[in-house]
C-alpha cells in the first residue's frame, strides 16, 4: 500500500512539472573554427521581413513546430557563425524537427525593424533570435533575444543546448 501511494505521489509531481526541454543533439565538432568555410550568408537582403515571418508562422503552425526568427545581417560574423552551426548535420536535423526558421535581414539596423518591434525586441546587437509559439504569437525567450550575439565565442554544443532549451 505504501508503495502504491509513493508511486501515485511521484506521478502527481511529474504531471504537475513543466515539460522538460528536448535533449540537445551531441555535436561532432568542438569549435566554431571547425565550421565549413566560407560561412553562410543566410539573409535575403531583398526580402520583406513581415512577409517572410507571416509565411514561416503559417508553416510552423501546419508543421506543429516552433517559429525561430533570426534577425541579423550578412555583414555580422556572429550571425554567420550561427547559420554555420545550424548547418552542422546533427543540429540541422534537430532544428528541422523542432523549428521553422526564418532569417530576416535588418540591413545596418535600418530594415525590417518592424519585425523586432512586433515581438517587443530592440535591435542593439545581432543576431536577435526569437522563439515564437506560432499559435499564440508569444515568445518563449523575451528576456534572451540577444543571447547568441556572441555566437563566435560559443561552442557549437553550447549553441545546440541553447536551441534545445526552448523545445518541450
Image (tube, grey):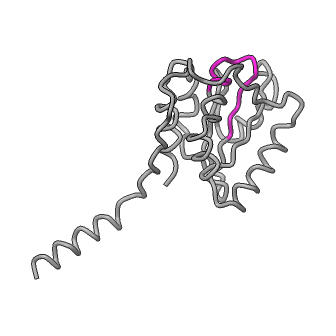
Number of labelled discs? 0
Q: Is residue 32 above or below residue 96?
A: above
Going by the image, does 11 lie left or right of 107?
Answer: left
Q: Is residue 143 above or below residue 138?
A: above
Of residues 45 and 122, the one nearer the viewer is 45
Q: Viewed as shown, does residue 29 lie left or right of 89?
A: left
Residue 130 in picture, x, y percent from top left: 62, 39
Q: Is residue 23 left or right of residue 114?
A: left
Residue at the farthest left position: 2
Q: Nearer the viewer, residue 7 or 157?
A: 157
Residue 41 locus on image (x, y percent): 76, 25
What residue do we see at 74% from left, 36% from top?
A: 103
Where residue 8 sits: x, y (%)? 23, 75
The picture places residue 119, in percent across and down from the top left corner, at 66, 41
Residue 71 highlighted magenta (yes or no) = yes
Instruction: Name which residue lies at 72% across and 62% down.
Output: 62
In this image, 36 relative to 151: left or right? right
Task: Identify the residue shown where x is 64% and y is 27%.
Answer: 127
Span shown in magenta: 69-81
Amino acid at each position: 500500500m505504501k508503495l502504491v501511494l509513493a508511486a501515485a505521489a511521484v506521478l502527481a509531481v511529474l504531471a504537475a512539472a513543466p515539460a522538460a526541454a528536448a535533449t540537445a543533439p551531441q555535436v561532432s565538432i568542438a569549435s566554431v573554427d571547425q565550421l565549413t568555410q566560407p560561412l553562410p550568408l543566410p539573409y535575403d537582403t531583398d526580402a520583406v521581413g513581415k512577409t517572410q515571418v507571416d509565411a514561416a508562422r503559417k508553416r510552423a503552425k501546419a508543421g506543429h513546430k516552433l517559429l525561430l526568427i533570426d534577425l541579423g545581417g550578412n555583414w555580422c560574423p556572429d550571425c554567420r557563425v550561427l547559420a554555420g552551426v545550424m548547418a552542422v548535420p546533427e543540429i540541422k536535423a534537430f532544428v528541422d524537427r523542432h523549428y521553422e526558421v526564418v532569417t530576416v535581414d535588418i540591413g545596418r539596423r535600418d530594415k525590417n525593424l518592424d519585425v523586432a518591434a512586433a515581438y517587443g525586441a530592440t535591435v542593439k546587437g545581432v543576431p536577435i533570435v526569437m522563439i515564437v509559439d506560432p499559435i499564440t504569437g508569444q515568445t518563449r525567450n523575451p528576456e534572451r533575444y540577444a543571447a547568441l550575439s556572441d555566437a563566435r565565442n560559443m561552442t557549437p554544443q553550447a549553441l545546440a543546448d541553447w536551441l534545445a532549451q526552448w523545445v518541450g
